[in-house]
């Protein structure tokens, strides 16, 4: 599942050690070659760089202070590399040195000073380059204790700084960062109610009898709700899935003063006596989000097992036995940790709420066209700039359903494509009476020759589906192609497990002559350009009226 | 731990460290360079894995001295 990665380190990391088993394709640079490696390694594979500050300090002469020059050399080499790198560079750094406590109380040690300066440079790099990730690995080591993760014997015997445990911590951290980078984050948190959001059973104990807010577990349940709220504020959609009486649950939400979560925070709820996996399917339909973006939290192991068995694509959390661990467990959950949070993420709850309203209204309304006209759709085209680049990348990485070719471009690749004036690259923002949906589409058209262009990417977020916005976007794309003087636009559909909905999208919009899933569109009626498989046909785009 | 169990556990470790090599039942005569993959680096990885599996720790000296299954068994027996 993970890509091939290269690892280099200032000291020795033993290749083939059992710690690396879960990172299936790792290659280590030669020991001692780290600096050359950093400067000369190839740009199209992910690299992991591990720095131990102790390796740069002359241990035989502790009085001699490390010159910052050495560290600034590393920074400039890194910066050079990042200008060209097409794959992530992950920089792990450990500044841990076994200092005497009292000696470092009144004054900052030399290493502390270096660390502050060095880390502030690295943070700047990390802001400047989307594919650069800087990890203070000491934070992870300290969870296990430095005396357990470092090992002097391994150092003296094999020039390896770390113990068995330390190697495992390093390997796990690398895995977590890479996995997070290459797989889309989860979108929905589905929660049980009784003994999950609060202690006790509301149907039996009543609202007043619940454990919530009191010292002991009551406080733990409340902190758990705070952790839920934290994720919700960062763009996670909340849903309830509980075997309960609907009324009882909402009574708690409305009347219990210690509740952190409010009714308005919950976007979808299935409170009934059905099987939980059936409810999950219903929630997925209601939100129009795939089950593989769902995380399910339930205190009851039997319910968890049933969901695991019936819906393996749902991420079922192995909940800790004791409630006092839950807030930490949920807060630190990898599934919701995004390396980059965009403005769009922060608005998600509102967007999905307006989407739910939209879906309800369109079901009631009889005439679709009239209805769509009445909601005042306002699409707007945006060029790629540094403010929306990370959103463009996110759309490209995460859009599965309405996506013709599912080519996953990284931010720097999108930037590169858009800088070439022969290509056409744009984003679309949509607003209607239900709110501002933000940037929801990316189109990339590549030049083939002076007369032919290729529709390289055409994708749209699924949360605004049903508005026929695709018609408007393809029309804009065609207009732009004509302006550039292109005569023919070629499209291609690459089937995946999820993008069946766009299979016929281009043929509905006038593209013809299906050859290996490729179709062509003549941009002008009287096109004299001679393509053997070409056929002149009038371009007709349905649903364009809505946007007039 | 009986000798038999001890050897069985060592076989599991050997299989983990040398996935490309066929490990036979009789391991007592194996030592460094018995097969291609068992070089000094693999020896280091092997000893770390033995430590993990048996919850024990070798000294720096033992790390450089132990180079065969016989020696591993001898040290492990002494420790238990």
Image: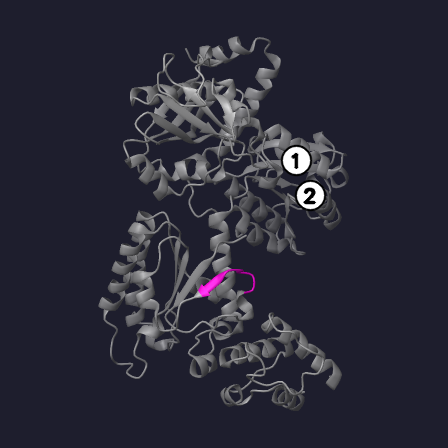
Residue contact between numbered discs 2 and 1, judged by CB atoms under 8 Å:
yes
The first of marks 2 and 1 along the sequence is 2
Q: Secondary structure at mark 2?
A: loop
Q: Is residue A305 above or below residue A114?
A: above
User: In the shown orientation, is residue A58 left or right of residue A379?
Assistant: left
**Spot occupied by residue A294 in the image (x, y as percentages of width and height):** 60, 40
The residue lying toward the viewer, choosing from A258 and A314, is A314
Relative image position of residue A185 (x, y in whole percent)? 52, 44
Eyeballing the image, is B6 above or below A366?
Answer: below
Q: Is residue A286 above or below residue A363?
A: below
Q: Is residue A24 magenta?
A: yes
Query: Image point 53% across, 65% down: which residue?
Result: A20
Answer yes or no: are tags 2 and 1 on the same subunit: yes
Name the residue nearer the viewer: A408 or A485: A485
- Write the residue at 42% across / 22% down: A473
Instruction: Please tell me whether the stretch drawn in magenta is mainly helix, strand or loop.
Output: loop
Snapshot colouring: one colour
Q: In the rendered structure, does residue B30 fall within the stretch colored magenta?
A: no
Residue A35 in sight: yes
- The residue at 54%/46% (across/down) is A227
Q: What's the mark number on residue A210?
A: 2
Residue A165 locus on image (x, y percent): 53, 71
Cα separation, mark 2 vs mark 1, equals: 9 Å
- Residue tagged 1: A252
Q: Chain of mark 1?
A: A
Q: Is residue A63 left or right of residue A262?
A: left
Q: Is residue B68 above or below residue A431?
A: below
Residue A70 appears in which quarter of the rendering?
bottom left
Asked whether the viewer can see residue A256, the reply is: no
Q: Which residues are magenta?
A: A21-27
- Which chain letter matches label 2? A
Front residue of A56/A491: it is A491
């Amino acid at each position: 599942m993970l890509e091939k990665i290269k690892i280099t380190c200032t000291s020795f990391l033993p290749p083939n050690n059992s710690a690396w088993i879960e990172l299936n394709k790792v290659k280590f640079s030669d020991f001692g070659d780290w600096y050359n490696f950093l400067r000369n390694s190839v740009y199209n594979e992910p690299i992991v760089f591990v720095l131990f500050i102790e390796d740069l300090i002359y241990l035989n002469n502790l009085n001699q202070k490390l010159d910052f020059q050495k560290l600034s050399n590393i920074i400039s080499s890194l910066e050079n590399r990042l200008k060209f790198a097409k794959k992530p560079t992950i920089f792990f750094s450990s500044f841990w040195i076994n200092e005497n406590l009292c000696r470092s109380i009144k004054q900052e040690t030399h290493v502390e000073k270096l660390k502050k300066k060095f880390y502030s440079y690295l943070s700047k790099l990390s802001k400047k380059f989307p594919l650069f990730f800087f990890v203070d690995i000491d934070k992870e080591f300290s969870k296990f204790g430095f005396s357990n993760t470092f090992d002097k014997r391994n150092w003296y015997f094999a020039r390896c700084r770390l113990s068995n445990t330390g190697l495992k911590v390093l390997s796990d951290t690398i895995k977590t960062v890479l996995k997070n980078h290459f797989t889309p984050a989860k979108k929905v948190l589905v929660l049980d109610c009784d003994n999950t959001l609060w202690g006790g059973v509301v149907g039996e104990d009543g609202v007043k009898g619940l454990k919530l807010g009191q010292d002991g577990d009551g406080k733990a349940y409340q902190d758990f709700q705070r952790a839920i709220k934290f994720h919700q504020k960062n763009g996670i959609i909340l849903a309830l899935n509980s075997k309960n009486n609907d009324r009882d649950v909402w009574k708690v939400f409305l009347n219990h003063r210690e509740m952190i979560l409010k009714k308005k925070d919950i976007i979808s709820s299935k409170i009934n006596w059905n099987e939980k996996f059936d409810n999950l399917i219903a929630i997925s339909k209601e939100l129009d989000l795939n089950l593989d973006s769902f995380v399910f939290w339930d205190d009851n192991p039997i319910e968890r097992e049933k969901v695991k068995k019936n819906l393996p694509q749902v991420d079922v959390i192995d909940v800790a036995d004791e409630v006092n661990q839950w807030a930490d467990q949920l807060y630190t959950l990898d599934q919701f940790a995004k390396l980059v949070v965009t403005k769009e993420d922060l608005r998600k709850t509102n967007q999905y709420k307006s989407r739910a309203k939209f879906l309800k209204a369109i079901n009631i309304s009889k005439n679709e066209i009239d209805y769509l006209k009445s909601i005042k759709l306002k699409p707007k085209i945006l060029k790629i700039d540094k403010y929306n680049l990370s959103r463009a990348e996110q759309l490209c990485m995460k859009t599965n359903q309405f996506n013709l070719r599912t080519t996953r471009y990284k931010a720097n690749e999108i930037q590169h494509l858009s800088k070439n004036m022969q290509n056409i690259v744009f984003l679309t923002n949509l607003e209607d009476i239900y709110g501002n949906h933000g940037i929801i589409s990316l189109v990339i058209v590549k030049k083939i020759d002076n007369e032919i262009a290729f529709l390289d990417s055409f994708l749209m977020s699924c949360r605004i589906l049903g508005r026929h916005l695709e018609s408007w976007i393809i029309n804009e794309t065609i207009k732009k192609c004509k302006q550039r003087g292109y005569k023919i636009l070629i499209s291609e559909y690459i089937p995946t497990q999820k993008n069946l909905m766009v299979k016929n999208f281009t043929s509905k919009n006038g593209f013809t002559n299906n050859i290996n899933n490729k179709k062509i569109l003549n941009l002008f009626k009287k096109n004299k350009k001679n393509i053997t498989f070409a056929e002149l046909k009038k371009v007709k785009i349905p649903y364009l009226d809505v946007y007039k | 731990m009986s000798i038999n169990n001890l050897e069985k556990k060592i076989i599991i470790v050997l299989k983990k460290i040398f996935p490309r090599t066929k490990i036979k039942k009789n391991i007592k005569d194996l030592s460094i360079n018995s097969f291609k993959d068992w070089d000094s680096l693999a020896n280091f990885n092997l000893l770390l894995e033995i430590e993990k599996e048996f919850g024990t720790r070798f000294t720096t000296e033992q790390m450089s001295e132990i180079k065969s299954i016989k020696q591993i068994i001898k040290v492990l027996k002494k420790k238990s």
